[in-house]
Image (spheres, helix red, strand yellow):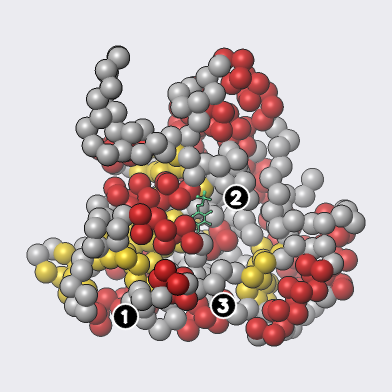
Amino acid sequence: MQKFVEFVRNIYKTKDFIALHEPVFIGNEKKYLNDCIDSTFVSSIGKYVDRFEREFAEYVGSKYAITTVNGTSALHISLLLADVGNGDEVITQPLTFIATCNAISYCSAKPVFVDVDRDTMGLSPKSLQDFLEANCEIIDGKCINKTTKATIKACVSMHTFGHPCKIDEIKAICDAWQIIFVEDAAESLGSCYKNKHTGTFGKVGAFSFNGNKIITSGGGGAIVTDDEDLAKRAKHLTTTAKVPHSYEYVHDEIGYNYRMPNLNAALLVAQLEQLDKFLQNKRELTEKYAEFFRKYDEIEFVKEPHNATSNYWLQAIILKDLEERNKFLEYTNKNGIMTRPIWKLMNELEMFKDAQYSDLDNAKHLEERVVNIPSGVTL
Ligand SMILES: *Cc1c(COP(=O)(O)O)cnc(C)c1O
């Protein structure tokens, strides 16, 4: 462990505290922000919002992108676009950040948890298939949960730390069961599965640009889709459902004030320009870590899954057991190297403890062993 601390200090070339993931602003950030302030268009309308939406859609290979105030709101709207509503159920993975389940709850729907795969740390197609076969039936074109009688409207998979899960298999199962597939791609900007960008496989995908993500707007998110009607609806819902009019205030449903301010978009345009550089830098870091951990048989360094290119947003290792994990966390944090355990399983949190779930052996195994290590872009 002492060797690890020395190794990380050597990479980041500092004796100070080393964070898990700090943003870096080494491009046009100040220039665009100043431009924004000079123009007085700092709030909800402005050219940087439009520009980012255009450039982001192009980057991920999607027809439309709609920016939001954060990734959670992008997920919330994505689920509404998937027609998730009161009393519905949404299948997802228990090993994820709380935002995935919060967004489901905002729709007055309930999460149902199936297991993850060991190699991707994301939703397992086999576990999904097994759950559906054991518990569900299709009635009038809807997937009905036989236990609760509720409709399973959507399935949200998440690409843990940027590693794509087995998206095509999950999508095929969802299609067969009349379930709308939604991707929580909050962590996977820059990650591809079979050469297609994550977030673009389902009907809608959601991204986050929070301060700790691979590029940041301070806070922010985006919804992507290829469907023109859904894109229009996303814009409408995120901008208080105001009917376009040159001076009247007419709103035709209960909408949300979820739009991203131009100021944040200005920062984000500059960040997007540097994304490829950040991705390259992270790959170099991955190689260094992989080389280092090769010497330690009892620690597994997490590499990108088969068929996928990962953005390596957060680097991760898998320790031997809970005890070793705790020792590692204790030692590194005490010595000024920030490390963090993976999330607690969602079904173990108070709010979701009554949720239905299948065997979660892999999720439990990973929950007790996975630790994130410093992953920020090295200057
Ligand atoms: C970051 C993140 C989000 C969105 O978070 P915001 O802070 O609201 O931008 C959603 N899901 C996952 C898995 C995340 O990591």
Horizontal and vertical percent position of residue 298: 72, 84
User: Disc 2 or 1, which lies upstream in sequence?
Assistant: 1
Horizontal and vertical percent position of residue 202: 35, 54
Q: Quadrant of the N terminus?
A: bottom right
Above or below, 297 relative to 150: below
Label 2 SS: loop
Question: Label 3 sits on what residue type?
Answer: Leu
- Residue 229: tell me if it is visible: yes
Q: CA distance from mark 2 to mark 1?
A: 33 Å
Label 3 SS: helix
- Residue 272: tell me if it is visible: no
Find residue 130 and name its label.
Answer: 1
Of residues 231 and 112, the one nearer the viewer is 112
Question: Label 2 sits on what residue type?
Answer: Lys
Find residue 156 and name its label.
Answer: none
Residue plotted at (88% across, 66% down): 6
User: Disc 3 or 1, which lies upstream in sequence?
Assistant: 1
| Residue occupied by mark 3 | 366
Question: In this rendering, would 5 be left or right of 47?
Answer: right
Question: Label 1 sits on what residue type?
Answer: Asp
Residue plotted at (30% across, 49% down): 80
Q: Is mark 2 within 8 Å of ligand 1?
A: yes
Choose mark 3 or mark 1, whichever is in front.
3
| Residue occupied by mark 2 | 213
Q: Residues within 10 Å of mark 2 (few under 14, many from 20)?
A: many
Horizontal and vertical percent position of residue 323: 69, 85
